[in-house]
Amino acid sequence: MTNGPSFFERAFGEFRGRAAGVALGCLICQMGLGLTYIRTGMAPELIEGLGLAGRTELSGAATPQLIFQALASPLVGILAVRLGASRVLAISAALFAFVFFGFSRIESLAHLYLVAAGIGLCAAGMGDITVGHVVSQWFHRNRGLALGIAYAGSNLGGSVMVALVSSVASQATWREGLLAIVPVALFVLLPTALFLVRPPEVPTLRHAPSGSAPPEEHEDALDLRRALRTRSFWILTATLFTFFFFFTGILDHLVLFLVDTGLTKNEARVYFGQAVGLGVLSKILGGFLSDRIPQVRAVQVVYGILALSSLVLLGLIYRPHPALIATFVFSWGFSQACRDVVYPLVLSHCFGDRYLGEIYGAMTLTLFPGGALGPIFAAQLHDRLGDYEIAFGVFAALNVGAFLALLFVRNERRRD
């Protein structure tokens, strides 16, 4: 009688050889997605340096970024299949260098919006679609953990890149801080995309990875047309909208809000960096756990913590205590990052793997309305009322509602 695989083999068995190198390459490439955090981290300097009239003008830059990111995503998916993910990632890295060179030279609000559009285009190419495509090809039994490790790169990159730009800016100017991103894109992201990220050889049935999905598991998968007739599709789409609305709203205003509470700009940026950097741990842990617990339960837990973070944030308006700030940083940083990992997995549970790309792509269209409206909504209320009380109250109500709605998500393949 032979012994079964050990815990280590079950948890990490696919992380060996070439696959381990690909996972590392995907993590590094995802650090490029962290460049989208820089505009928020440098918000006070941009408002002052460009002479902006208020926070609404700065938050408006999220609109062109999200438009280009959302519209480019379907094309990125096609190119990742036809050209290969490595080439798409390499093109995005080179384009990031060009965009941030232009970012360091902007002189007006119009220039800022043009740069934001470029950042959105690059983020689509270096984002979850391309990296997820590669990881799904290489990993099967440990897919949740592999996605968590790869997607952790965006949070690691956000924390490191904001710290790099802020450090250079404190010693020189904010323009030179932005210029420091150019060599990172050319000499770190670009070589990684070209030399570490590779598609696997097509396995035969004899050598198929242990734990991969047998053909019969794909036979009951729902395509987009059938998924549209299910309640889970619309629940997950609505909760994706509320997530983007809350996430981008806080992303744009967290540093500014903490400064309003009495913190210095550097102290506020430290908290912001911690919240973003915490995503490294949460994505890896979330991926590890999602391989072991029901996917629906995992997404419910994540949204429950997200709702808690929004309630803590609302409490900070009335009592800006360091303990509450730390609680928010942990709960928001953990949940917003972990959602990236558990969402594709719950879609697979509800609808199957075969058409996951087209279903997730359709849902991701909510990135534009939700992601664009969140920052502007918070900025308009602050500029008109002088605080974030109503905005944060709406965020909290939406997050609690999303958590309750997710209690009704189910496996739709069994009911089709």
Image (cartoon, grey):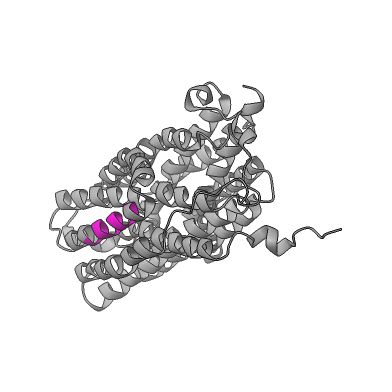
Residue 147 in sight here: yes
Residue nearest the observer in this picture, 345 or 323: 345
Residue nearest the observer in this picture, 172 or 322: 172
Which image quadrant: the C terminus?
A: top right
Q: Position of residue 156 (x, y in %)?
A: 44, 64
Specify the principal SS of the magenta part: helix
For this orientation, the residue located farthest to the bottom is 171
Relative to 249, 237 lies left or right: right
Q: Position of residue 146 (x, y in %)?
A: 55, 56
Which image quadrant: the N terminus?
A: bottom right
Q: In the image, what residue occupies the spot 33% across and 50% down?
A: 125
Relative to 389, 79 lies left or right: left
**Up/down of 160 relative to 134, above or below:** below
162 magenta-colored: no
For this orientation, the residue located farthest to the left is 107
Q: Position of residue 158 (x, y in %)?
A: 39, 62
For this orientation, the residue located farthest to the right is 1
Q: Position of residue 402 (x, y in %)?
A: 55, 37
Residue nearest the observer in this picture, 20 or 97: 20
Q: In the image, what residue occupies the spot 49% across and 32% down?
A: 238
Q: Which residues are magenta?
A: 88-97
95 magenta-colored: yes
Q: In the image, what residue occupies the spot 39% across and 44% down?
A: 81
